Image (cartoon, rainbow, N blue to C red):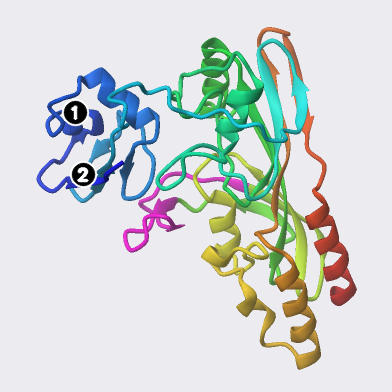
Amino acid sequence: MNKITLSANGNENIRLDKFLSNHISDLSRTQIKQIILDGFVHVNESLVKPSAVLDGSEIITYSLPKTNFDLDILEPENMNIDILYEDDYLVAIDKPAGLIMHPGAGQSNGTLANGLKYHFNKLSNSSGLLRPGIVHRLDKETSGVVLIAKDNKMHSILSSQFEKREIKKKYFGITWGKWIEKEGEITDNVKRKRSDPTSYQIDGDGREAITLYKVIKSGLYTNEVIFYPRTGRTHQIRVHASSRNCPIFGDTKYGGGQNKSRGYIPEISKKLIKVYKLFKRHALHAKKITFFHPFLNDNFSIESPIPKDILLLKKDLREINE
């Protein structure tokens, strides 16, 4: 599919779907909404909703399906999916690190969405046909529990619970540095970087972001931390941890890369670098999610065990920290 790039210059305070309908004469407004939901449209290299309002500074890229709106082009793929819980309304998946949630620019297969389409006959399509059942997302390198809706009603209810901050999330992370306070709340707003639309930063003009944290084990060089995000901004935990000079171990985007191993006595730096090179992602895991199940009329907590790679990292770092 060929990519087309548009500038929103001179188009302030206009919805994305309306903006595109003014530029793509061959498609109806409904079809344009569908390609946005299905991930064919990016604003500053990120996915947004059809209702997103442009401020005139954006760069919009889009591509159209080759089949001229045979939009159900998500290929089912037989992949191993670890199911933590399942009933008639939803399924909870234990997402491994390295697995992208759904197709996007440059990748049309090998995603969780492809696997979901293979394994489940009934999934919601509220988020578009390329994101069946997907109510919320985890970053590619983040492992852990993900809720998948089997129908649009459950999808709508779960989405509403996320929006109202009724769903409680618990993450386990390993960070560099020394936390000044062992327990606290970070309330710095988060905003996308203009210089790099794939990254976020602390900015008073950004969107509200709230993360509670508790250091459960302190070391000389790294820490084990529990995070409780109250909002769901993209990269929120990673940005908040980095803002306290305690970036997530292995998070090269936000300062948690190999350079953090340097500056100690040579023997320690050498050991930290060796451990770092053995670990292939950032050390963040979505450990637990708690929500109200409307059809079973009960509160549910679903937990994902800490994966083996993080357990091994904990062991290796403790030998250096102690």
> Residue 280 location in percent, x, y?
68, 62
Q: Residue furthest left?
A: 10
Residue nearer the viewer, 9 or 68: 68
Find disc 1 in the rendering and name its residue. Answer: 18
* Residue type at numbered disc 1: Lys
Q: Residue furthest bottom?
A: 266
> Residue 272 location in percent, x, y?
76, 78
In what quadrant of the picture does the N terminus appear? top left
Which disc is residue 55 wearing? 2
Rendering quarter of residue 197: bottom left
Q: Mark 1 or mark 2: which comes first in sequence?
A: 1
Q: Residue furthest front?
A: 67
Q: Secondary structure at mark 1?
A: helix
Instruction: Tell me the residue at 42%/55% (across/down).
Output: 198
Q: Is residue 143 above or below residue 153?
A: below
Q: Secondary structure at mark 2?
A: loop
Q: What stretch of residues is rendered in magenta? A: 190-211
* Residue type at numbered disc 2: Asp
Depth check, mark 1 against mark 2: the one in front is: 1
Magenta stretch: residue 193 in it?
Answer: yes
In what quadrant of the picture does the C terminus appear? bottom right
Magenta stretch: residue 318 in it?
Answer: no
Instruction: Tell me the residue at 52%/21% (across/down).
Output: 160
Q: Is residue 261 left or right of residue 224?
A: left
The chief SS type of the magenta part is: loop
> Residue 9 location in percent, x, y?
13, 48
Q: Is residue 244 left or right of residue 304?
A: left
Instruction: Tell me the residue at 88%/64% (across/down).
Output: 315
> Residue 287 location in percent, x, y?
75, 41
